[in-house]
Amino acid sequence: MRGAGLLLIGWVWLAGCSRHVVRVETEPGGARVTLNGGTNRGDRWSVAQESAAEIVATWPDGQRLATALLVDRDMQVVLRKDGDPGQIVGARPLARGASPGAAPVVAAPVAGPAAAAGDAMARARAEVEAGQKAYELTDYDVAIARFKAAYELIRESADPRAPEILGNILYNLAVVYERSHDVTPEPERLRRARVMYRQFDEQMAGLVKDWAASAEHADVLSRIRALDARLGGK
């Protein structure tokens, strides 16, 4: 049976997994660097093992370079403004259509925002992680916004992981809406929690064999009944 807290979405940073340091340098310096859409002090990030890292450097004159990597261990990346291959240590490039033995494909000039959009699943992962942190800090409205952003990023994804991840995001939204009522006692928050629990239940029914007989299904129904009782005729 599920506890009262959030689900840890089934990506690569679940509790107990290894994390590695990613350090990024630019030549010349002065570029703004993001990893999976976020900045960090000293252009250093702690990243889960075997996770995707989309790194983008933007210089003051608007020149942009990007690379996508799979993090194996501590790594250093150099992004060069002239587009020459950068040095990568401890990571595997994620090159679309490349064979396992192909030469690494690293930073290349980015023509515009669309080319630098990156992998939707990786960006959704970052949004979910931010939502989980916001929830722990009781910043419930921030958590709701982050989970919604993650959902929108992958709602049309063909990735085979997407359906279950979307279901888990719905569950997390339900939990956050329900918990946020303690801080902002608006009946609409409980109504939204009820809707999200129902959507989660429907999603999982299509993914999990014998879902209707599972303890998780029973738990969700119990949560919905409890919300109905709290709402009454509201």
Image (cartoon, helix red, strand yellow):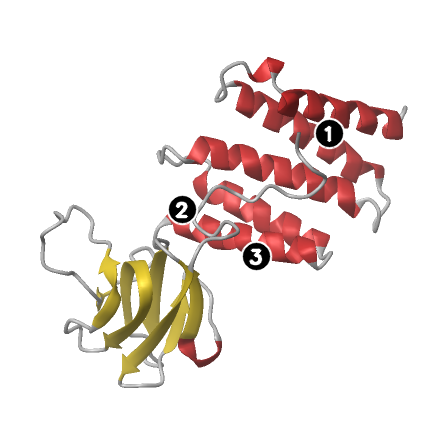
Q: CA distance from mark 1 to mark 3?
A: 23 Å
- Indicate left or right for 200 with 58 as reference: right
Residue sitting at the far left: 102
Give the image quarter of residue 46: bottom left
Circle number at residue 194: 1
**Residue 139 placement (x, y as % from top left):** 71, 57
117 and 217: which one is in front? 217
Is tag 2's residue or tag 3's residue first in the polypeptide sequence? 2
Is tag 2's residue or tag 1's residue first in the polypeptide sequence? 2
Q: Split into 4 quadrants, where in the image is the N terminus?
A: top right
Q: CA distance from mark 2 to mark 3?
A: 14 Å
Residue at numbered disc 2: 121
**Residue 118 placement (x, y as % from top left):** 34, 54
Q: Please state which amino acid type lies under the numbered disc 1.
A: Arg
Circle number at residue 130: 3
Kindly indicate whether the residue at mark 3 contacts the one at mark 1 (C-beta within 8 angstroms).
Answer: no
Q: Please state which amino acid type lies under the numbered disc 3.
A: Ala
> What residue is rendered at 61% in x and 19% in y?
214
User: Quick check: 70 above or below 35?
Assistant: above
Secondary structure at badge 1 equals helix
Q: Split into 4 quadrants, where in the image is the C terminus?
A: top right
- Indicate left or right for 32 with 187 as reference: left
**Residue 78 placement (x, y as % from top left):** 26, 76
> What residue is rendered at 87% in x and 25% in y?
229
Secondary structure at badge 3 equals helix
Kindly indicate whether the residue at mark 1 contacts the one at mark 2 (C-beta within 8 angstroms).
Answer: no
